[in-house]
Amino acid sequence: MAGQNCLVTNDWICGEYLRSRSQELTDATVQHIWITAVSVVIGLLVAFPLALLARRSRRIAGPVLGLTTVLYTVPSLAMFSLLLPLFGLSAALVVTGLVLYSLTILVRNILAGLEAVPQEAKDAAKGMGYGPGRLLWEVELPLALPAVMAGVRIATVSTIALTTVGSIVGRGGLGNLIEDALPSFFKAQVLTASVLCVLLAVVADLLLLGVQRLLTPWTRIRTTRDAVGAVAKVKAV
């Protein structure tokens, strides 16, 4: 009875809410994850060729980076309104908007990672007979992965937050629960959905960090070597 009373008294923390709305929370969380994952993956697929295009010519780099920056400054409500005639009230509307927002982060990080590849590494690969395609996929991209993955992590966390805005068309995942609860100020629902959003962002960032460490084992070796060197210097002193 005490657990049910927390719904009546509209408490922030309410175990009965979690028990009675567990399926609703699960569905909203799954939708949130799905929209985020699809948006980031499509964003990567679009950002990669744009970054390659920007790297090829300085004259192209300016407009590409400028356009992606301008897109990021457009308010989410205005962005969805502009896309509404094309996609209607659908998940595609939200995903497209999120993809456009992710481009400024992804394009810049991919471009920065590729430009940071040491010239001597590229020269050595060319000396071994690597063509442009093989050089990109087997030398440049692996060495650029730390910067690329950093961009993916930032874009993912940002997209998780922006997905909630999709609630204006009923495709906002956990944002739907927050919007539904605000008119009546249903505290337990607002708090639970908000906390789940934060947890999703933290878990996604940690998972991507783990993937980054698996894909770039040489960075761990370098970090360990630097740490050992620092300890040796301290002992020498």
Image: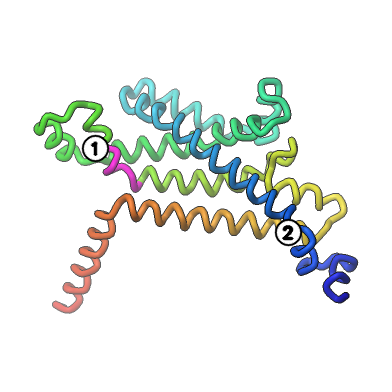
Query: Is residue 25 part of the magenta span, yes or no?
Result: no
Horizontal and vertical percent position of residue 205: 49, 54
The residue closer to the viewer here, 64 or 133, is 133
**Which image quadrant is residue 171 in?**
top right
**Residue drawn 56% across and 30% down?**
71
Q: CA distance from mark 2 to mark 1?
A: 46 Å
Q: How is the image coloured?
A: rainbow
Query: Quick one: SS at disc 1?
Result: helix
Q: Earlier in the sequence, mark 2 or mark 1?
A: 2
Q: Does any portion of residue 81 appear in the rendered image?
A: yes
In the rendered image, which quarter contains the N terminus?
bottom right
Amino acid type indicated by mark 1: Glu
**Residue 22 - label:** 2
- State the image coordinates of residue 134 (x, y, percent, origin top left): 22, 31
Q: Nearer the viewer, residue 171 or 98?
A: 171
Q: Residue at x 21, y 69 (%)?
A: 228
Task: Name the residue: 81% across, 52% down.
Answer: 181
x and y, in percent, of residue 110 in the image: 37, 37
Q: Residue furthest toward the right?
A: 8
Amino acid identity at mark 2? Ser
Give the left or right position of residue 67, taking residue 166 as reference: left
Q: Residue at x 73, y 60 (%)?
A: 191
- 162 relative to 86, above or below: below
- In the figure, is residue 208 to the left or right of 19? left
Span shown in magenta: 138-146
* Labelled disc at residue 138: 1
Label placed on residue 31: none
- Badge 2 marks a residue whose secondary structure is helix
The answer to if 139 sits in the magenta stretch is: yes
Residue placed most toward the observer, 107 or 29:
29
Which quarter of the rendered picture does the C terminus lie within? bottom left
Please, which residue is most extreme toward the front here? 23
